[in-house]
Amino acid sequence: MDFLICFNEWFYKYWLTLIYSVIKNNKNVKCNFHIITDSLSENAKKNIKRLENASTWIFIHEFDISEFENLKTCVHLNKYVYLRLMLDKIPNINKLSKIIYLDSDMLCIKPIEDLKDISLGDCIVWAMWSKPDENIERKTTLNTSNYFNSWFMIIDVNKWIDFWVSEKTLSFIEKNPKLLQFLDQDGLNVVLDKKVHFLDVKYNYPYHNLKNMSYSDICVIHYAWNIKPWNCYYYLRWWVVYTYYYSLANKSPFALLKILSQSISFVIMKSDLLQYAVRHVFLFLKARKKQS
């Protein structure tokens, strides 16, 4: 199985937990990971490569992304979201029949080996429906038949290349910045309209809906938006989700908690939890003062 993951230097530490989770839960197949980035330090490359084994290969592709400098960004989505649009620039990528794109803030908790042999039929991409309210608003604004979430995609590589998906998407983004809310996801929805098959939600399940579904029914959890497992001050609110993430991270020989000495530690985690508590006490006292 071939996977596509895109990130910058800062994010690679967290991605190691994702790749470890995929390896751990899909032991019956060979996994090839194609990493698109702008640049990585030698130390980062070394840590990533240490996750390779007899059935796991990791290929790092560094590209100049200066062409993204003038594209629209927003608070929660920066220029690095456009990295996946460089899929067609990976050397010999056309030799693959399909590739699975995973967002870096995902976690594989059950096998997804069943996706290995599926045929995409006439579609270019298989992906998950977006939220109902988001679906209605976005497809109306963009004038598309439906609206999909692009953070987990099974891509027919050659159809993607032959249909010029990356080029058409970038062109739409450049020409229509005022229409964009979710940047390249909006562009992909326009370009791929009626060329998408919709997947089961279990492959891209939002963390905040976990109370509505058993872990046994989910294959991939998506820690979407700003509440990330490494932002520990959210732990009290989403402790079930976070406990599972850290239990898996701790089992990885090179994953999250074991290589984050430069940015996070258990001391900082405790500090974050304290800050979380202090902040809410402050807001409570401030509200009481206003009332009085």
Image: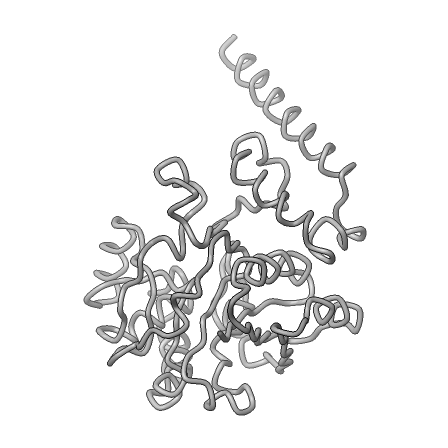
Residue placed furthest toward the top: 292
User: Is residue 22 positioned above or below 281 on the image?
Assistant: below
Asked whether, in this view, residue 17 is left or right of residue 139, the answer is right
Asked whether, in this view, residue 32 is left or right of residue 161, the answer is right
**Front residue (pair 190, 119):** 119
The residue shown at (49%, 81%) is: 87
Asked whether, in this view, residue 234 is left or right of residue 132, the answer is right
Where is residue 226? Give x, y as percent: 52, 47
Where is residue 158? Give x, y as percent: 38, 88
Residue placed furthest toward the front: 28
The residue shown at (41%, 49%) is: 218
Numbered label tally? 0
User: Is residue 103 positioned above or below 201 on the image?
Assistant: below
The residue shown at (64%, 56%) is: 14
Where is residue 92? Give x, y as percent: 53, 91
| Residue 117 picture quarter | bottom left
The residue shown at (46%, 85%) is: 96
Where is residue 103? Give x, y as percent: 50, 62
User: Is residue 179 positioned above or below 63 on the image?
Assistant: above
User: Is residue 158 positioned above or below 134 on the image?
Assistant: below
